[in-house]
Amino acid sequence: MLKGIKITTQDKFEVVEYEDKLEVLQQMVGGLIEYVPVCNNIDMIINDEGKLEGLDINPLATILFSYDYIVGDALIVGINDEGENISLTDKEIERILFVIKNNLKNCEGIREKYDKIKYEI
């Protein structure tokens, strides 16, 4: 079992243990998976078709990614040099949770901006 952090669209987050199998990862994000980089050796797994399916925005995941809006539930995972999933270290978990906790207050503002953009498209 590997350790990661699951972040939901309802601003909930938790350290989770998961099995590194495609079906498990798809279940955790609710569909086909896509990897997006967060920083060195840390990726976020998201629903590849989340925007097409009209999934709700995930403000906390959006804060961590910062290049685009993230929708649907997300899983933060460690990645080795070969691109394989590995457990997040305790230090990585501590740092990511620190960023998440310090940005909870920004979630509503991100939702409002996303709603404006969504309706302009």
Image: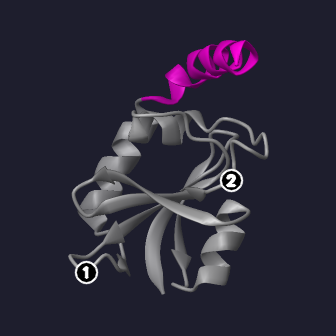
Look at the numbered disc 1 and give the secondary structure of its residue.
Answer: loop
Q: Is residue 14 left or right of residue 111?
A: left
> Is residue 97 inside the magenta stretch?
no
Image point (68%, 53%), residue name = 49
- x and y, in percent, of residue 3 in the image: 44, 74
- x and y, in percent, of residue 79 in the image: 31, 71
Image point (67%, 82%), residue name = 23
Q: Is residue 68 left or right of residue 46?
A: left
Q: Name above or below for residue 19 compared with residue 104.
A: below
Q: Quadrant of residue 87?
A: bottom left
Q: Name above or below for residue 81 compared with residue 31.
A: below
**How many numbered callouts?**
2
> Is residue 106 inside the magenta stretch?
yes
- x and y, in percent, of residue 28 in the image: 66, 67
Image point (41%, 41%), residue name = 65
Give the distance between the C-alpha atoms of the residues marked 1 and 2, in whole angstroms: 25 Å
- x and y, in percent, of residue 40 in the image: 21, 57
Circle 1 sits on which residue?
Answer: 82
Circle 1 packing at 10 Å, graded few (<14), some (14-19), many (20+), is few
Q: Is residue 1 left or right of residue 121?
A: left
Q: Which mark is residue 94?
A: none
| Residue that extends furthest to the right in the rendered view of this protein | 53
- Looking at this view, is 121 or 18 the one in front? 121
- Looking at this view, is 92 or 74 the one in front? 74
Residue type at tag 1: Glu
Circle 2 sits on which residue?
Answer: 49
Image point (67%, 47%), residue name = 72
Which stretch did the figure color magenta?
A: 103-121
- Looking at this view, is 16 or 49 the one in front? 49
